[in-house]
Image (tube, rainbow, N blue to C red):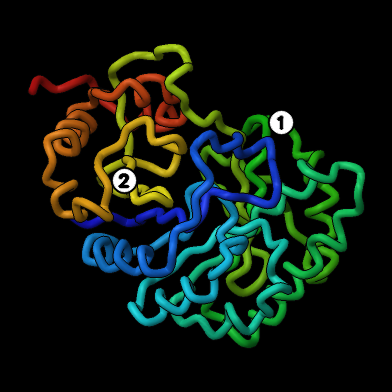
Amino acid sequence: MRFLKTYIEISNICNLQCTFCPEVEREKKVLSPDNFKIILKEVLPHTEQICLHLMGEPLAHPEFEKILSICNEEQAKVHLTTNGTYLQKYGFDTFFKATSLKQINFSIHSFKDNYPNKDIRPFIFDILQFSKEALSIRPDLYINYRLWNLPSPDQERDENQEIIDYICEFFQIPINEKVDVRFKKSKNITGRIYFHFDTRFHWPSLQDPHLGDLGFCHALSQQIGIHADGTVVPCCLDKEAGIPLGNVLTEGINAILESKKFKTMKNGFQRHKLVEELCQKCTFRQRFEKKSAPAVPP
């Protein structure tokens, strides 16, 4: 069993509160470096990439540099998603010297959510300066500017126009930001720096209405998630552990991957049948419906 991505939530605490991310209802938790190392060693044989987030702001972790150092020691391929507000706290070299770090996603839509009446430029300048230096120091580093706040693929992106214009002005590169996210989400700016667009989506909840028990998802085939307390969940959208598969710190990942619950759910997806209640209420998995097919008998 090998996944494309394993999401390891090093902290579920964030310094911002965006409309994109609902508030975490779980107990506030920070994953210790020792436990992170245990988890990392468990999952590395089973995954291509380590994503240092699920909920929370990873750079707000009080020992983030130690977490990054462990990733370097274990030669993990790391993807980092951040709102960028803590870049100066660590200094750019912390990230440039991290050989394990392969991609950084900046959620630049977060500023407008939290400070709608403030000038965007001071907030985003550090991110742009970081990117500019990365072009010469770490040209191999992929950088995405996420604007995952589009209302629908057909509507205009007026909400983001100020941000887009400022970025294009900074790099002195004109960008045609018109892109239909149903077919293509990225627009190259320069080097390995990209805009990454997507529409808003609803985080699934057990309180949502039932949508049906037929469908498909890439959970358990391309990804798993691990909460800051070690709880393994099927995907990065299971923010409250609605489908707990076990705890990697107490059971180990191999036992979880061989468990009846894991196999039943994974086999269900392969037969286009949703066996878990949270999946039956998830609107995000409807994005895969065109690839789905009628349920196959067990």
The C terminus: image quadrant = top left
Relative to residue 199, is residue 277 depicted above or below? above
Cα separation, mark 2 vs mark 1, equals: 37 Å
Q: Residue 138's x, y, as percent? A: 57, 83
Q: Is residue 156 left or right of residue 292?
A: right
Disc 1 marks which residue?
155
Q: Say which of 156 and 219 sits in front.
A: 219
Q: Position of residue 12 (x, y in %)?
A: 53, 49
Residue found 35% across the figure and 20% down from its top: 280
Residue shown at the point (58%, 82%) measured from the top left: 96
Task: Identify which amino acid the numbered label 2 is placed on.
Answer: Val
Q: Quarter holding the N terminus?
A: bottom left
Q: Residue at x 22, y 20 (%)?
A: 294
Q: Quadrant of residue 97?
A: bottom right
Whole-percent x, y for residue 94 in the image = 59, 81
Decide: few, some or many residues near mark 1? Use Cα within 10 Å; few <14, some 14-19, many ≥20. Answer: few
Question: Counting residues from the N terminus, which is met first, the one under dot 2 or under dot 1?
Answer: 1
Residue at the limit of the structure toward the left, as seen here: 298
Q: Which residue is mark 2?
A: 232
Looking at the image, is 17 positioned above or below residue 100?
A: above
- What residue do we see at 38% from left, 64% from top? 36
Name the residue nearer the viewer: 276 or 169: 276
Q: Is residue 106 left or right of residue 253?
A: right
Q: Residue 89 occupies which quadrant of the picture? A: bottom right
